[in-house]
Image: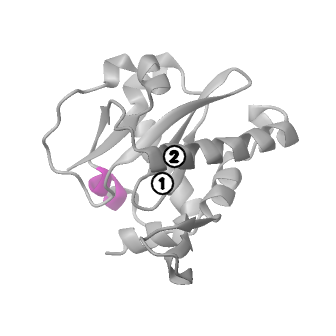
Amino acid sequence: MRTPIHTSKKLEKLVKKLIQTNSKRECGILGKWNATVFYVDRKKCWLISNAKTQYLVILTGIKTTELKNIEEIFKNAFYGQLVYDGIITDFENLNEIIGELEFLPTDNDRKTMGFQNHRIRDLEWWKDEFGSLENMPIKDLTNRLNTSPIHIGKGHRMSDYTDSIKEMKRLLMK
């Protein structure tokens, strides 16, 4: 199993060594993810969102020297966010579901890019409130983003509106 993460052009420039160009392996149940970079106090932070559920994970203060451990960093942050959001699962089970991370160039998914840009604007507002990265309760802020109403589906019925936490629970419980 593998979990593809499509990087934005901005992030791709920062992680050139990780980018793979061709992949034909089977994708896991989580589907693809999209990642972009934003800055807090001149520190690189990654906003990673799942395309199926719009579930967000934020990695903070990622340095170039840590890129060799990015798979472990992502899995730990994802598991920690799931626990914080009340989605209890075994780490070994999650590790198996994720499999190997595969970083790919941008897929130009305009819907996801727009969603991420909107969430980064929310984070910009909270940056002013909390001041520095050390003062920002990242798991709490990510939880706030994950509980915001989202639209999943084709129609405009009320049942098409949900939040990312409910969708991620539904996906992991299959």
- Find residue 116 and report its image quarter: top right
Question: Which residue is pictured at 17% across the width and 31% down the height?
Answer: 22
User: In the image, which disc is placed on residue 79?
Assistant: 1
Where residue 62 sits in the image (x, y, percent)? 55, 27
Q: Would you call the spot at circle 1 few (<14 residues within 10 Å), some (14-19), or many (20 or more)?
A: many
Q: Is residue 95 magenta?
A: yes
Report which quarter residue 107 is drawn in: top left
Left or right of residue 31, residue 134 in this image: right
Q: Relative to 54, does residue 125 appear above or below in the rendering?
A: above
Give the main secondary structure of the magenta stretch.
helix
- Asked which secondary structure carries label 2, the reply is helix
Amino acid type indicated by mark 1: Tyr
Image quarter (top left, top right, bottom left or bottom right) of the C terminus: bottom left
Which of these two is toward me, 112 or 146? 112
What amino acid is at disc 2?
Ala
**Label 1: element kind:** helix
Residue located at (64% from left, 58% from top): 143
Residue 129: image x %, image y %? 86, 42
Circle 2/circle 1 CB separation < 8 Å: yes
Give the numbered dot on residue 141. none
**The furthest residue to the left:** 24
Q: What crowding class fits label 2: few (fewer than 14 Cα within 10 Å), some (14-19), or many (20 or more)?
A: some
- Of 113 and 139, the residue lying toward us: 113
Task: Say above or below: 14 vs 49.
Answer: above
* Range shown magenta: 93-98
Residue wearing tag 2: 77
